[in-house]
Image: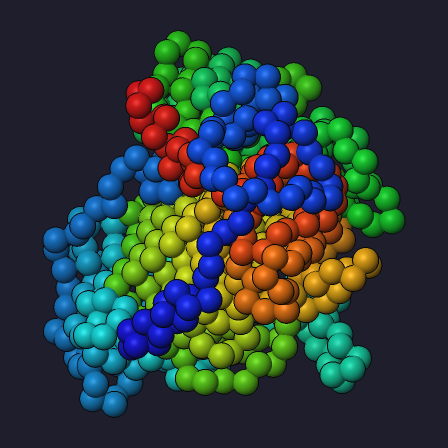
Amino acid sequence: MGLFITKRLFFRVLIATAACGSAMGATGQAVAQATQEPTQEPSYELPAILGDVQTRETHELPDFSYAGYGYGTQVIPHFATSIDVADYGAIADDGVDDSAAIRAALAAAHEQSGPVRVQFGAGRYILSEILWLERSSIVLAGMGMGEGGTELFLPRPLNQIDDGGALTEIGEYLFEEDKYEQQEDANLNVLFSKYSWSAGFIWSRVPGGRHGAYLERYDRPIETVATIERGNRFERILSVPDAGALEVGDVLQIFWHNREGPDGPLIASLYGDTDLEIAGRGVGSRHWETPGRPLVQQPTQIVAINGNEVTMADPLMHDINAALPAYFAQWDHLSDVGIEDLALVFPPNPDFGHHNEAGFNGVYFTGVHNGWIRNVRISNSDSGILTDDIANVTIANVVTEGDHLAHYSVHLGNVHNVLVDQLSVFNPTVHALSFNTRSTKSVYKGAVVWTTPTLDQHAGANHQNLYDNVTVHVTPDRTSSDGLPEYDLYRAGGAGYWQPGHGRFSTTWNLEILVTGGVEPGGEVSILAQSEGPDARIVGMHGNRHIRLSHTPEPYIEMHNRPVRAVPSLYDYQLGQRVSEN
């Protein structure tokens, strides 16, 4: 099982060349067409956006280091107590469907008190049912994702499996909202698949169903815990009129609503002073058409209370004051849920097209605060890992592979402080690295995308996210207006009613673009970013060809065509600064 990965890594060594550098002054001034001449001299200076006081004040950066398990500073635990699936009749490599036995082992784990690990042996198990993770302090673990490891073989898609009605509401929503995938050239006119961005064979959830609804009639009442009087963006201390209902250790949501329409103060905080159209001709309407629902939500933990001052585990994303009110709300969630050391393998299967997926989905991770997915390989999926309603989750050392065109590799949707570390994407995807609707303060770090790469900021009030030290392999597939080979790297999805593509402070740091064909040595490639949002930060975009970036709207650009050698990873740098200060 590990041979394929080895060949891919060898291929990378063959095609990767030394990255070119280029000079750009440390003024921090943004340009939409970055065309500096490359330089052969490496530079190790600190970028101005980190090292120059004036630049830092005028071009703010969020602190992304709070992403991941335990706000980036805690070690993922090991659960010594285990339940062996073999004790319930699941035998590897016998060719017999193991679903009933595995589910029996999982049920026993749910009945046990204390942290527990459901352990697989080495070899292949056949699974044709959903594995529900519905309690805290539970881990699903194998013996590894490669040779000598554990493989869960999934012979059929989710559209042939009973989910107990978990996606009934989504089906109603798709029908009532007239969500059809229409491709005239392919004679395709079908209702969106329920599995395009939901469901998986390993599925974590709070007992009782989905965290939230698409249709307002299914909304659960919001349980307000405490009103917040004041707080400043990027700071951790806020004030409340009465802290009596709060306790240190509470994990709650902070909710901001937009009750002021398209010109409300939350819209201004999200998108700043931008010329982008947010209101008009149906653009951006979801930002104000449901004022009873929070537009921005921040799961966080209370770490200190001093009178009416409350210290949170991570910084506020927005101000809180009389003009921009917010409050603490109850959040039903699980904690310490893990999936590790497994391979999820689907059989070769046909590609039925965008939004027409049959449901070859690996993991659906929902309703978790402080969890992890690590050392997992997923083959031939429609989507490898889908997420929803999670916070402070680490997804590390994941490989997605196969020839099947996937919708997503690892998808981040409606999440906060999620760290995706060392993701390798070998399979073709519609959206390779995706910050989807309402994703905030999350990070793709050290990812390598080998084919059809996209940095998808999918629209939907997603903001303050980071692509960090990512490598993409591109082959230009179009030509710019002035004849340059061109690739639309930031090609994004998302409906018009959720535009723009993202909110303020979304950041790309030390992105390496390796051109694998179509551009001669010493030549230039055009990289498109035409569906983005305001106040983006792009620092250290570089590669093995000279890069011209065409980005709309205009971002902050620094060290273009030069790697950020002094700070290869912004996440690691900010985490180191935070730990040393504390």
* Residue at (63% x, 51% y) in the render: 547
Q: In front: 10, or 470?
A: 10
- Left or right of 495, for residue 231: left
Question: Viewed as shown, does residue 339 lie left or right of 534?
Answer: left
Among all residues in the image, which is located at the extreme front? 40
Q: Nearer the viewer, residue 33 or 90?
A: 33
Check the image and report above or below for 318 versus 75.
Answer: above
Residue name at image x 83 percent, y 50 percent: 282
Q: Where residue 317 sits in the image (x, y, percent)?
A: 55, 30
Quadrant location, the N terminus: bottom left
Residue occupying image coordinates x 79% and y 80%: 184
**Residue 291 falls in image quadrant:** top right
The reply to whether residue 389 is visible in this rendering is: no
In the image, is 526 to the left or to the right of 213? Answer: right
Q: In which quarter of the image is residue 57?
A: top right
- Residue located 32% across and 71% down the image: 6
The front one of 120 and 306 is 120
Between residues 291 and 533, which one lies in front from this camera angle?
533
Task: Tell me, yes or no, if residue 115 can be seen here.
Answer: yes
Image spot of residue 21 (x, y percent):
54, 44
